[in-house]
Image: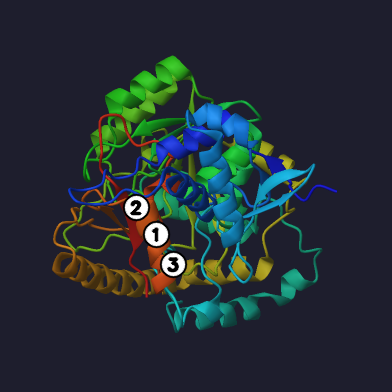
């Protein structure tokens, strides 16, 4: 019986290998043999998760034709990978990718390290900080006090606890965006919200316009839902969106959905201004595209003089064009898996109805904990503590990078949890691979883009570093 679970075509693998764009060798540097470069390229694709483990690779002759190299080169590369534990073969079944015994399976997104591994690895790949105590403990204690009446019910609230829906609606109204509880659905984190939205609006084959780069786990969620992603490059530095480019993509590609992070963009840290927000909403409305605004970072400004623009949904208060996703997981604690969606009431009803085939609802106790935080002022104090932690980590990271790696280029973000770095021509993918070996985990640019291709006309290598504790 074959031990591979998927297949990688020769043309597809050749495109992935070409997209790595290895840095040219400097003067006096001896190039490795062709088979060694090919073996290294395939191994790196496996470690990045861009070629799955247990994926059948093309036959030697097919790959040789696709790469315009000799079959001998491919055969030697495959043999090197088998020796290193990255390839297994059996006569009649072909060759399929593997990882050496004892190695963890590569992450397709940016999964956090398990807690027991934190002592041996510095994880700069996950935007998560320890809980802001004592507020987590107080919130759970407050939730337990409120729990008894709910314990006498069935406990299923597909739209969320009425009290929390009303509290979230009131918070939007206090920001100048009139909102009814009927416009709110509570979800299991922002990922749960995005999963529900994608399944409702973007079935298999539908187009979704996304920023490039963007949040790797959301991109992977969309891919697995069968969506066709249309990338729109971010403007340089912290300038935010290129709205003219967005307008062109929305007009020509007519995507069903568009996903954006306006507030301290993940991973570049950019903050879109009000004019950009207004123009993008107008462009989405004209194109008939539903604009999903991820505001999970909106409360994480780190410098006291930052003036936050109005929310994206402020330019579409009825929710006919803009769907907003929020969460407690970034601003409070990643372990608090409470998110929410704000949209038009009919959209919320459709999302709730579709949820019956997914997770049915969000845990009651955690909803009560977040409701306690919102209702007592504990949320504001906890988030202020979180800002202080992130600010200290950001400043320490910026100082260290400037001191140790003066050739790297970046702009210091005013908020969020990510530093986007241009690495002076070094491959972010290879830096990420070396980092794993020496105990520092960072995500490379390739995981954060729709594909492995760099933006046209650039030769920069980039990576994202999360400043976490």
* Frontmost residue, 41 versus 373: 41
State how the image is colored.
rainbow
Instruction: Look at mark 1 in the image and give the residue it sits on.
Output: 432
Q: Are marks 1 and 3 in contact (CB under 8 Å)?
A: yes
- Crowdedness near tag 2: few (<14), some (14–19) or many (≥20) residues, C-alpha within 10 Å: many
Q: Residue furthest front?
A: 72
Q: Residue furthest top?
A: 252
Structural distance between the alpha carbons of marks 3 and 2? 12 Å
**Residue drawn at x 37%, y 69% as measured from the top left:** 383
Above or below, 22 relative to 124: above
Q: Is residue 311 left or right of residue 159?
A: left
**Residue drawn at x 41%, y 37% as measured from the top left:** 19
**Residue drawn at x 58%, y 79% as measured from the top left:** 140
Q: Are marks 2 and 1 in contact (CB under 8 Å)?
A: yes
**Residue drawn at x 80%, y 47% as measured from the top left:** 2
Structural distance between the alpha carbons of marks 1 and 3? 6 Å
Instruction: Look at mark 3 in the image and give the residue it sits on.
Output: 436
Q: Which mark is residue 299?
A: none
Residue 394 locus on image (x, y percent):
26, 67
Instruction: Look at mark 2 in the image and give the residue it sits on.
Output: 428
Q: Are marks 3 and 2 in contact (CB under 8 Å)?
A: no
The image quarter in which residue 331 lies: bottom left
What element does badge 1 sit on? helix
């Amino acid at each position: 019986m074959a031990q591979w679970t998927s297949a990688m075509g020769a043309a597809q693998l050749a495109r992935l290998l070409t997209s790595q764009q290895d840095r040219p060798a400097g003067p006096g540097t001896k190039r490795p043999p062709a088979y060694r470069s090919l073996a290294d390229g395939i191994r790196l694709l496996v470690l990045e998760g861009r070629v799955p483990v247990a994926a059948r690779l093309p036959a030697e002759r097919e790959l040789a034709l696709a790469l315009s190299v000799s079959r001998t080169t491919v055969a030697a590369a495959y043999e090197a990978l088998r020796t290193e534990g990255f390839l297994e073969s059996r006569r009649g079944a072909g060759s399929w990718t593997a990882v050496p015994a004892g190695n963890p399976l590569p992450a397709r997104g940016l999964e956090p390290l398990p807690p027991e591994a934190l002592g041996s690895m510095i994880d700069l790949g996950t935007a998560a900080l320890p809980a802001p105590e004592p507020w987590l403990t107080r919130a759970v204690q407050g939730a337990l006090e409120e729990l008894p009446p709910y314990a006498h019910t069935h406990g299923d609230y597909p739209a969320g606890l009425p009290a929390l829906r009303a509290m979230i609606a009131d918070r939007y109204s206090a920001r100048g965006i009139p909102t009814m509880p009927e416009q709110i659905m509570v979800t299991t984190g922002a990922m749960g919200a995005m999963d529900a939205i994608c399944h409702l609006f973007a079935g298999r084959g539908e187009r979704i316009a996304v920023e490039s780069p963007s949040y790797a786990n959301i991109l992977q969620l969309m891919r697995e839902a069968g969506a066709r992603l249309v990338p729109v490059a971010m403007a340089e530095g912290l300038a935010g969106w290129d709205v003219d480019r967005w307008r062109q993509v929305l007009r020509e590609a007519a995507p069903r959905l568009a996903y954006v992070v306006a507030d301290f963009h993940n991973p570049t840290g950019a903050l879109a201004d009000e004019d950009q927000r207004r123009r993008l909403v107008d462009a989405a409305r004209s194109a008939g595209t539903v604009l999903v605004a991820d505001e999970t970072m909106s409360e994480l400004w780190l410098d006291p003089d930052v003036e936050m623009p109005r929310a994206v949904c402020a330019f579409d208060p009825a929710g006919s064009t803009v769907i907003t996703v929020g969460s407690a997981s970034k601003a409070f604690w990643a372990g608090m898996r409470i998110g929410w969606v704000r949209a038009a009431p009919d959209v919320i009803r459709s999302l709730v109805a579709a949820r019956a085939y997914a997770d049915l609802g969000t845990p009651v106790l955690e909803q009560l904990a977040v409701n306690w935080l919102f209702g007592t002022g504990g949320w504001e104090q906890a988030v202020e503590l979180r800002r202080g932690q992130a600010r200290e980590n950001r400043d320490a990271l910026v100082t260290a990078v400037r001191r140790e790696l003066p050739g790297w280029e970046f702009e210091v973000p005013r908020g969020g949890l990510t530093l986007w770095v241009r690495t002076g021509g070094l491959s972010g993918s290879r830096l990420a691979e070396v980092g794993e070996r020496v105990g520092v985990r960072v995500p490379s640019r390739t995981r954060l883009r729709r594909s492995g291709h760099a933006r046209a006309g650039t030769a920069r290598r980039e990576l994202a570093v999360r400043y976490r504790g």
